[in-house]
Amino acid sequence: MAKLTDITWEDFSRLDLEAKKPYLERTEGDGMPYHTLFAQQFDRGILERLCTLANRIRFINKSKEGALYLKNVLAHKRAMLYFSQPSSRTFLSHLAACQILGLTTGSVRDAATSSEFKGESHEDSIRTFSSYFDMIIMRSPEQGLAEKMAWELSNSERPIPILNAGSGKDQHPTQALLDIYTLIRSFENKGGIDGRTVVFCGDLKRGRTVRSLSYLLTNFSDVKQVFVAPPELQVPDDVTAVLKAKGVRYEISNDLRAGVRIADAVYMTRIQDEWDTAKGESAKIDTTGFKFGAEELALLGKDGIIMHPLPRRDEIATCCDHDPRAMYWRQMRNGMWIRAALIASVFGFEQPIMNCGY
């Protein structure tokens, strides 16, 4: 079993993601992650196990007795929510997931309120948190920071799991989990995800949710991915390189309506102008043809769905909100359940929950 204590940070950082995966699994060797850092850690078997566990947790939680049982599952554990990048949904979803399982939580939501404001390094902050907590759920604008902190903690006297809740522009693995969970639930009585067409639209260049979900979709058979965006915001080459290597069908397009006509799922995203390198850079891009409204809704198949990681601006018109095909509000709630399933699995409580009497 590969361990992060067996490899230097320099050597680990040079590995490709597939080669990193064995270093991040639980010692039980069942494929479940100990550190959750990137979407490529999850194969189809693990995804289906997590979705099954999420369904089980949400069923148990329906009764008072079941909810009280769940609150005792991890009542002996504490989780630190370390969010140095603004967030509402991701923060609250992880917080709610912890509460369902009974974890006590602490939080830092602004580096200005932590000792980093005084010049403390990320490494020292993380080591401090590990003194008080049993898991760190972290979100950062700094690419690769979650990986570095996972290596640091695994090589400390108190190794605890890191859960990446968003890292720079590269990865957002738990958002991808809730997106897959939403797709599975949406199509569970309609033939599943295999053979579907998923259309991504918006800022595909800087949208880490698109990148992570695109990777996860490669675990399913014959799923076509269509990327619709202005040229300046089109999906980057490293994503399409993965799709080519895996033999996945994909299409690059600037025609949203054409994509909607063939879509089983339309995944809309906002313009990520917080990553602009110059003031007003994104505002100069013409995005008028990349918005979903009443006319696009009329083109979507009766079994099609609309998704969005949120927050939105004007890329989905509010007239779509009450259509049964609009899944973005359910998508948010799904995040709470799948994140609870992941946290329970990290601590080894998958089978106790699956086998309990509720």
Image (spheres, grey):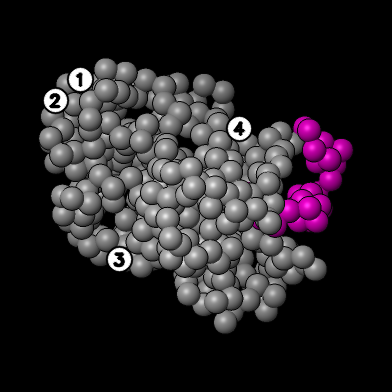
Label pair 2/3, CB-CB below 8 angstroms:
no
Tell me the SS state at disc 1: helix
Residue 247 percent location from the top left of the image: 25, 64
- Please name the amino acid that badge 1 sits on: Ala
Query: Which quadrant is home to the C terminus?
Result: bottom left
User: Which of the two marks, 1 or 3, is nearer to us in this view?
Assistant: 1
Q: Dot 1, crowdedness within 10 Å: few (<14), some or many (≥20)?
A: few
Q: Which mark is residue 298?
A: 2
Q: CA–CA distance between discs 2 and 3?
A: 33 Å
**Residue range corresponding to the magenta coloring:** 112-137
The secondary element bearing badge 2 is classed as: helix
**How far is the residue under mark 4 from the one under mark 2?**
35 Å
Q: What residue sits right under mark 3 in the picture?
A: 246
Residue highlighted by disc 4: 86
Closest to the observer, 353 or 304: 353
Instruction: For mark 4, give the secondary structure.
Output: loop
From this viewpoint, which residue is outermost toward the right?
A: 118
Quadrant in which the N terminus is drawn: bottom right
Instruction: Identify the residue position indicated by label 1 in the image.
Output: 294
